Amino acid sequence: MNRQALDDLKQQIPLMGYLQAHDWYPARPLSRGRWMGLCPLHGDHQPSFLVDPTKDLFYCYGCGRGGDVIRFAELYHQVKFPQAVAWLRQWRGAEPLLQEVTRFYHMQLHRHSEAVAYLYQRGVRSPALIEHMRVGYAPGSCLRGWLTQLGHSLPALRQSGLVTDAGYDTYVRRIVFPLEGNLYGRSLSAASPPHRFLPGAKGGLYAWEQVRRYAEVILVEGLFDYAVLWEAGFQNVTCSLETHLNAHQFRQLCDGTRTIYLAFDADGSGQQSAQCLSRSLLERDITARLVSLPEGHEPNSFFVSGGNAHEFHRLLEEACP
């Protein structure tokens, strides 16, 4: 990209907006419209991250790094300059497209009985939960036509990962959950890989903006674990989409004083990951407790097999450091 194109990109993505989209919030105002907050680039305990929205620049007095939105993307996502530019261009253009895709898949859900049956089997049953999570279904063969009618080009759809090189729906026969800048698809077919994401980062912790205010947070691995807990009344639950948190997700857990209940799968790898994460949180002075589910269970199977909110409350009370 030439200098003019880079300047245009930075003008289209104000630094403050990009920071807030990645869960950064100022702690206090300064003179001349500037703001100070915790640095999202390192383990910051005292606000040292200065943002000047007028100049679209940042500087951290703790780690000594600063620059514009492109430099922030380089440091935050740990990529080189060309990858940071590509990341920002994708981020700028992906959101409207993903909103259209989410709306389309959501409309398809109740038109396909196999999708509704699968959700019922996994404990996703109430209309309120389906609306809350904006659950959808990708039947295949019709997304491309819908999006091209809305003006999206086939090359753009291929580049986004929504459509294959052959022009087919990437998420065919999958339950779809919208994420922060991505989509998660769970296959209904045992012949296909169970999990699918679009190229790029999976984003932060699921529904974190709704959860971060709680003093006690339940962290689970999968979205179906999240779903059954939310439906059972545990609205202080979030999801990492795997046992290993990315740097962004870990920073989110550590952005305040709270207790984290780690309700990972009761298998060897799940418990090992929970213990490792618990130690890492302790190093950041965050209290973590390990929830011991019955052998062979994760939260989803616990509730689907007959567990209830009262019994899960007891597991939380018995959780150990």
Image (tube, helix red, strand yellow):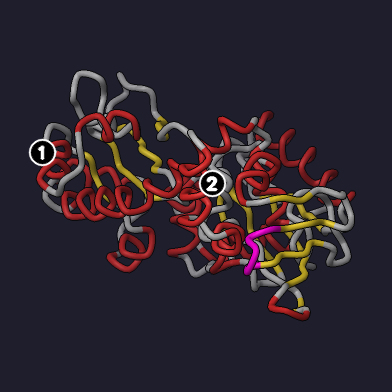
Q: Is residue 258 among the parts visible in the rendering?
A: no
> In the rendered structure, which disc, 1 or 2, sits on the residue that comes first in sequence?
1
Above or below, 13 against 32 in this view is above
Image coords of residue 292 (percent x, y): 69, 47
- Corner quadrant of residue 296: top right
- The rendered magenta stretch, by its main secondary structure, is classed as loop
Q: Which of 132 and 150 is in front in this view?
A: 150
Q: Is residue 56 magenta?
A: yes
Q: In this view, does 87 lie to the left or right of 99?
A: right
Residue 149 is covered by the magenta coloring:
no
Which residue occupies 83% across, 58% down? Answer: 286
Cβ atoms at labels 1 and 2 below 8 Å apart? no
Residue position marked by numbered label 2 in the rendering? 203
Q: Which residue is drawn at 67% across and 58% down?
A: 315
Could you classify mark 2 by the number of other residues whose Cα lies within 10 Å: few (under 14), some (14-19), or many (20 or more)? Answer: some
Three-letter amino acid code at the position of disc 1: Gly
Front-lying residue, 215 or 23: 23
Compared with 35, 152 (above or below) is above
Compared with residue 96, is residue 154 higher up or lower down, i.e. above or below? Answer: above
**Which residue lies at the image location 63% right of the left edge and 37% below the top edge?**
243
Numbered mark located on residue 145 in the image:
1
- Magenta highlight range: 53-57
